[in-house]
Structures are given as structure tokens and as C-alpha cells.
Image: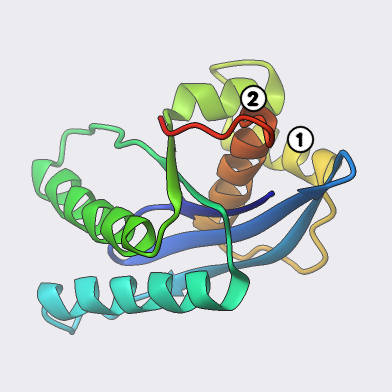
Amino acid sequence: MRILAIDPGFERVGIAVLEKQDRKERLLYSSCFKTLSSEPFATRLNMIGTEITRLVKEWGPDGLAIETLFFNTNQKTVMRVAEARGVIIYAATSLGLSLYEYTPLQIKIAVTGYGRATKTQVEGMVNRLIEVKKPVLHDDEMDAIAIGLTAIASISPRYPHQK
């Protein structure tokens, strides 16, 4: 089973591709895709959709794992992330990927066993659970890896389902 895991955003999109074979998880790819704030928002959304399409075609994942929205006090930011999330979901599902969505609480519990874990605790457990061969420069990339680990732990390869 191969999963494209995404920490959604419109300025930075955390990306990870994980695979599980023979009861072992492997990180195949991770990065943080960035758009420029100087570009019009519609252009940034198009860039995100194009990148997701490229990744699906390059890595051939079976599913898309994505974090649900976390509502904060900045409604403009939440709306823009929601729009970016919609583009990501559309791009991936239009190419045949199953969709798996997880809340921040579900991800923290799956990775650390504790729903109120800090980013530092999540990062520490990710590094214990899977080999990350290159330095992770942004939280968004580490979050995507954690989302991928959550998906791999929760999806039965014999009985895939859509959440």
C-alpha cells in the first residue's frame, strides 16, 4: 500500500509518500511545496493542484491521506486553507485515489498515543517510527509524514475503504 500524505496549506503544503510492504513502513519521499505570496491566490491554487497531479503520476499512490481543518481565530486563513484543501482533494480523487481524512487529535494519538502531544513529541515519535533520511526543514513536512503514518496504521490493505 502506498499513501500520498498532505498537510494542507496555501503558502506551504507538507507532502510525504509512504509505503507499507511486508509489515514495514518506508518513507519514499517528503518535501514542503511552497507558493509565492506575490502570486494571485488563484495562481497559487493552480500551482498546488498541478503539483498534486505530478506527485500522483510520479509515485502512483493508492490513497490520499489529508488532515482536516483546524479552526483558528483567523477566518481568512481558514477559508484559504479550505480552498487549497479542496483543490488537493479534487486533484487526487479525480485521478482515482481513495480519500482518508484525519483530525489533528487522531494523528497525535496514532503517532504518540497522546492526543495533546506537542509538535516536538510528534516529531520525536515520527523519527522513532520511520527512517527519515534527510533533514526536515519545515513542520508542514513532518506533519505530512505523521499523517501518512496515521493512514498506514488505520487502513487495512485487504479491505480499503473511503472515509
Residue 125 image label: 1
Sequence-wise, which precedes: disc 1 or disc 2?
A: 2
Quick one: 161 or 41, which is closer to the camera? 161
Picture coordinates of residue 53, whole percent (x, y): 40, 74
Mark 1 vs mark 2, CA separation in Å: 10 Å
Identify the residue at horizontal 31%, vertical 67% (top origin).
Answer: 11
Element at badge 1? helix
Q: Which residue is mark 2?
A: 110
Picture coordinates of residue 20, whole percent (x, y): 77, 47
Picture coordinates of residue 37, whole percent (x, y): 22, 77
**Neighbour tally class for label 2: few under 14, some 14-19, many 20 plus, Cα within 10 Å:** some
What amino acid is at disc 2? Ala
Identify the residue at horizontal 63%, vertical 60% (top origin).
Answer: 17
Element at badge 2? helix
Query: In the visual, does 127 lie left or right of 152?
Result: right
Quick one: 137 or 46, which is closer to the camera? 46
What amino acid is at disc 1? Met
Identify the residue at horizontal 58%, vertical 60% (top origin).
Answer: 61
Identify the residue at horizontal 17%, vertical 84% (top origin).
Answer: 39
Q: Is residue 7 above or below residue 135?
A: above
Picture coordinates of residue 125, whole percent (x, y): 76, 35
